[in-house]
Image: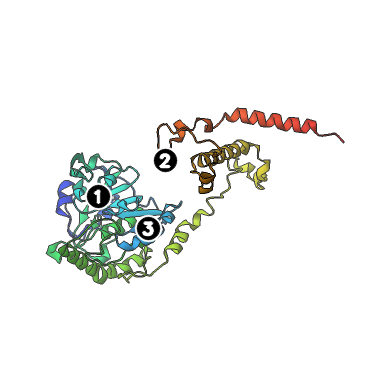
Amino acid sequence: MRQRGLRDDKADDGGFRHSRSRHEGVCVEMEYHQYSPHFFARDRASVPLEGLYRGASAFLICNGPSFVTLDHNLLKKPGVMTFGINNGPRTFRPNFWTCVDDPVRFIKSIWLDPKIMKFIPQSHFEKKIFDNEKWAPMDVKVGECPNVVGYCRNEKFHAPRFLSENSINWGNHKDFGGCRSVMLPSLRILHLLGFRKVYLLGCDMKMAENQTYHFDEQRSKGAVSCNMSTYDRLKSEYLPALKPVFEADGFMVYNCNPESELKVFPFVKFEDAIKEATAKLGDVEHERVWGMYSTPDEKGKWKNEPPQEAKKHLETLKLVKELKTTNISAIQMKTEKPTLAQQEADLPIEPDEPETCGANDEQDINTTTCLGPLRQPDLAKVLRDREQQQMKETQSKPTL
């Protein structure tokens, strides 16, 4: 069931009207038995993303300093989906991202990165972004950036309606007590996408002038006070009210920071959360492929996988790996500096130093242009030579 928001955000509503105005008690989806979209393109066409990640787990990366203490490589594992907010991608590039403030507050690489799906308020499409390298406005609008999806906000919070409204709540307008936060639309978007387990990372819920974010940004005393006020409302009002609504819908939220000031959601160790999120995939690194291209009727024939040495099609791959390893070792040997003992003995270094194309000891040597002798040989020729050598060895063996 989809209900209308209690009060639509005026900026988003002015930029886009999906339907005629209704009183707040009307269920939009059921009124005409029509699907009520939540995500839109710049031209106001609906983008059907609801339920796309049905039943999956996601990591919501908040911007508290504790995030830097985690092993970010674990977030790059297969099966791990990440959602960032504001300038958090400066530290870690997520799969999804959202904001609620003006686009000029966020680094340009987020807007221009096609790998990040960006969820933005509908009113942001025609706003321009800011070049944080040249420190000047860019003549590029948000709607001209890749992989951007719009959504409409509402600004009157009511927990029982949070997961069923046809627009996305981001807190209360000042007419209803104020306090809005990007964390609220982040959770709603994850729910709409189909995620049913969300792990909070960097959710510290505390700030000071010397303890701001996990990226390089200062905050004035007034800004710190404003953020702390928002954190207090989230901790004492919004999130406690939402927890039973989430649980009733099977939407589970966990906090991976044991030192967090937010105690509403249960604590789960970061490493355990990663294991849960990736468990269904199995052993990806050693996953079997052999026999998968066989037809359903042939699957039984290929049930027992032969040993690696019996797979002739792997010989070329093995050779490539061997050559790659050999080349890397040779490059390392040629670029090693002489040891102190060698220098004292004035001994020649083996093998000879490669030509460096003018590069000095402090510069990286371009292995493509400078290490000509280390280029990978013709694989076909190497295989032929190996086969000939094997034939000679076989012929030279005495027959019994």
Dot 2 alpha-carbon crowd within 10 angstroms: few under 14, some 14 to 19, many 20 or more: few
The numbered mark at residue 361 is 2
Residue 255 spot, x, y in % from top left: 36, 66
Q: Quadrant of residue 315?
A: top right
Residue under the point 35% across and 44% down: 115
In this rendering, position of residue 136 left or right of residue 280: left
- Circle 2: residue type: Asp
Secondary structure type for disc 2: loop
Dot 3 alpha-carbon crowd within 10 angstroms: few under 14, some 14 to 19, many 20 or more: many
Q: Which residue is identified by label 1?
A: 120
Q: Is residue 157 above or below residue 119?
A: below
Secondary structure type for disc 3: strand
Residue 8 spot, x, y in % from top left: 18, 56
Secondary structure type for disc 1: strand
Residue lying farthest to the right in this orientation: 400
Mark 3 and mark 2: Cα distance apart in space: 43 Å
Residue under the point 61% across and 42% down: 291
Mark 1 and mark 2: Cα distance apart in space: 48 Å
Residue lying farthest to the front in this orientation: 345
